Image (tube, rainbow, N blue to C red):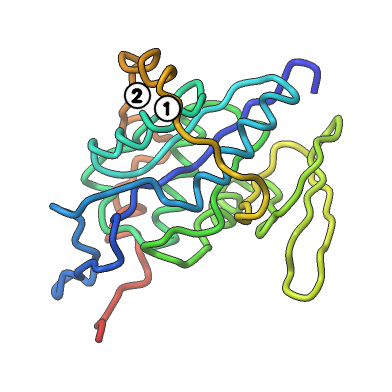
Amino acid sequence: KGQGMDIFVCIKQVPATSQVEVDEKTGVLRRDGVDSKMNPYDLYALETALKLKEAHGGRITVGTMGPPQAEAIIKEAYMMGVDEGYVFSDRRLAGADVLATSYALAQAIQAVGDFDLILCGKQTTDGDTAQVGPAIAEHLNIPHAAWVSGLCVREEGIEAEQQLGSVVETVFMPFPCLITVEQDIFTPRLPSLKRRKETTAKPVHIFGLERFMDQKEENYGLSGSPTQVERIF
């Protein structure tokens, strides 16, 4: 792509420990007062975006759905070299399962702009479903590939290598498309101290449901979630 690629990377703030408690009543993870970090798998998606930008030019936007304090991981992404960052924050989005989360993210991404490529880590360390990335693609009605361990940019799209257990399949997808990346795709770089100083004042954009095309509250959060945790033991 001559003018460079517009890339969106989905990132998530997750508990820094696996010792998380679940609210007995709602079945939702308790996140208050727990130390947080960027989902480790998302670092591979970020590195992939940065490598693509270095090779082909373009812009990288990151976004996360979460409370306002999730801007900490947006700032971390700035320190690695991304251009723009968003937190999609709204109480009405809380308690979402895979369906409601992916729908909210699809709505939010569309509110931010048009992207050639959307990148996700293969899963998160708190939910572990590995379904949100492909589900976003379904809501956006674009092609997707999961478990991608290598890729090659062509004029009109992406050639991706998928790790499918005993076989590796190579698929071609036209832009716009979404991929979730494996952790052997690239080694993530560390946030740079120099960039930390340069990006301290860089703003993190925060918005909620008011910017979405679909503002029906029943499609989001707990009410938009057909799956519920009944009991954990």
- Mark count: 2
Tag 1 near tag 2, CB within 8 Å: yes
Q: Nearer the viewer, residue 194 or 59?
A: 194
Residue drawn at (15%, 75%) of the image: 24
Residue drawn at (29%, 55%) of the image: 16
- Spatial CA span between label 1 and label 2: 6 Å
State left or right for residue 125 relative to residue 232. right
- Pointer 2 residue: 205
- Quadrant for residue 88, please give it: top left
Q: Is residue 183 above or below residue 77?
A: below
Number of residues whose C-alpha sits closer than 10 Å to that of mark 1, classed few (under 14), some (14–19) or many (20 or more): many
Q: Quadrant of the C terminus?
A: bottom left
Residue type, label 1: Gly
- Pointer 1 residue: 85
Residue type, label 2: His
Q: Quadrant of the N terminus?
A: top right
Q: Position of residue 126 (x, y in %)?
A: 36, 62
Q: Position of residue 218 (x, y in %)?
A: 31, 54
Mark 1 or mark 2: whose residue is earlier in sequence = 1
State left or right for residue 31 relative to residue 108. left
